[in-house]
Amino acid sequence: MRSRKRVKSIINKKHLLIISLVVILIVLGVLGYFFLLKNKLNLKGYNSKITINYKTDFKKANFTACYGNAFDCKNVKIKILNKIDTSKLGKQIINYELEYNGKKEKITQEIEVVDNEKPEIKIDSATVCPNNKINEVKFTVTDNFDGDITNKAKVEYKDKKIIITVTDSNKNTAEKSIDPKIEDKDGPVIELKGNSTISLRLNDSFQDEGATATDKCDGEVKVSVEGNVNTSVAGGYTLTYKAKDSSGNESKAERIVNVYDVNNGDRVVYLTFDDGPSAENTGRLLDVLKKYDVKATFFVTGNGPDELIKREFDEGHSVALHTNSHVYSYVYSSVENYFDDLNAISNRVERITGQKPTMIRFPGGSSNLVSADYDGGIHIMSILTEEVEKRGYQYYDWNVSSGDAGGTYTSDGVYNNVISTLKEGSSIVLQHDIKDFSVDAVERIIQYGQANGYTFEKLTPASPKAHHGVNN
Ligand SMILES: [Zn+2]
């Protein structure tokens, strides 16, 4: 009994072994077929999510594909179906089309465009003051994403090094350091309060406004003043301002104060502006006049905003009358029309300023010939020049023309016309504050005048009138 049982069990074990081997062979065969022999699509290097750097070219798939088995696999063409914009940060989806074995298959990939490039710091030079304050660091920072971010950088002086750190808007940080020179070569910068050239009349009061000085190493430093101004004696005076820093660098600045004896035949310039006010130009002209404390004369018309006439008056200029309409064919067609028009502008000025002006300027000046075209042969200028005086007005012409009413169309031209024809005595300058290029020239005319012994005055009823002489 015992031995038979044993034989049976040996047989059973043998069977089991054979069956197992057969199963293993079948499994291996099937696997071998699937892994080695069956034709299928193989992707190499494919990832469903990838990142790429900002602005890198993306024209080709970053993986390859073939179709076939382990022994023979043919390359598969990969076509990108949509455009990828690598100048935009963030996630985008790419769709690919793979063509193989007579069919087309789509696969997708998620691409994240990131900026992981650090900004680039370029240091040209660095100096530190003897007192360990940073003196000057010349450097630039450029970033692939943000562009020039020099002003975002932090500059420190630590452990005897100048350290520049900067972070771009995508949180990439760069750092660079340099051994600085210890150096202080620059003196303080002196800034005068008020103008550097001042024109005064005899016995005007003068109070020096002083100056401030700042030094890169020492901050604010003291300024000393040498020289004085005696306004009771005509002449040119120089005030000299000096400031020294702790390294011994000294700076100087000067202010010229000219005291003129106006009553003694000195040069006086009367700036006059016709045809305004002009919403575009008169305000900024008034700003310039205020900056140099120059008073001028405005021969106004019916144009422009009331508040500019108000400003002219409030800021101490002379507001005088030109014409309300400035239409030659109307104002010079009869004496009655002329005075109707004059009353209209007079009423406007009186309404705005509370005062009735007595100073006038004829459109085209007293010498104009254009009036003869409209007056029906009555020689209207001969009548008007007498009649206005009878009615209590004074009329003013000019003896310096800026040319801005014709022939000159640039600020340089106006400037040159005016300064080249200024008189030794009184200059009544004709300009138009409706012309922007003419207004542009005023600051330079004042600077030239103040530097060359001219005093600027507004016209008053007692001023010279520069009458041209009547031609009609
Ligand atoms: Zn005019």
Image (cartoon, rainbow, N blue to C red):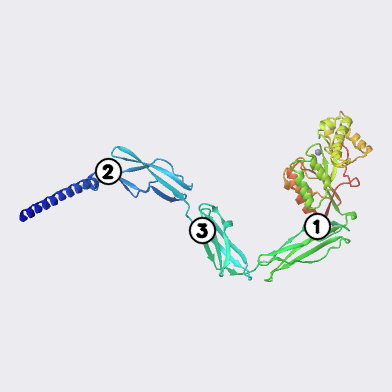
Please tell me whether residue 304 is drawn above or below residue 210 in the rendered image.
Answer: above
Q: Are marks 1 and 2 in contact (CB under 8 Å)?
A: no
Tell me where residue 183 appears, x and y as whole percent.
62, 69
- Nearer-the-camera pick, 386 or 153: 153
Q: Amino acid at mark 1?
A: Ile
Q: Is residue 92 visible?
A: yes
Q: Which residue is mark 2?
A: 40
Residue 150 position within the rendered picture, expressed as x and y whole percent measured from the top left: 57, 57
Q: Earlier in the sequence, mark 1 or mark 3?
A: 3
| Location of residue 29 with respect to 302 vertically, above or below | below
Give ligand 1's quarter of the image: top right
How far apart marks 1 and 2 lie (CA) works out to: 94 Å
Residue 312, located in which quarter of the rendered image? top right
Spatial CA distance of label 2 from label 3 is 47 Å
Q: Earlier in the sequence, mark 1 or mark 2?
A: 2
Q: Nearer the viewer, mark 1 or mark 3?
A: 3
Residue ID for mark 1: 198
Q: Secondary structure at mark 3?
A: strand
Q: In terms of secondary structure, where does tag 2 sit?
A: strand
Residue located 61% across and 64% down the image: 136
Query: Are the two marked residues, 1 and 3, in contact with CB atoms closer than 8 angstroms?
Result: no
The alpha-carbon separation of the residues under discs 1 and 3 comes to: 53 Å
| SS class, disc 1 | strand
Callout 3, which amino acid? Answer: Thr
Left or right of 207? Residue 161 is left
Pick out the residue farthest to the right. 390
On the image, the x and y values in percent for residue 95 come to 39, 42
**Which residue, given by chain and number where applicable, does mark 3 sit on?**
173
State the image quarter where residue 371 is shown: top right
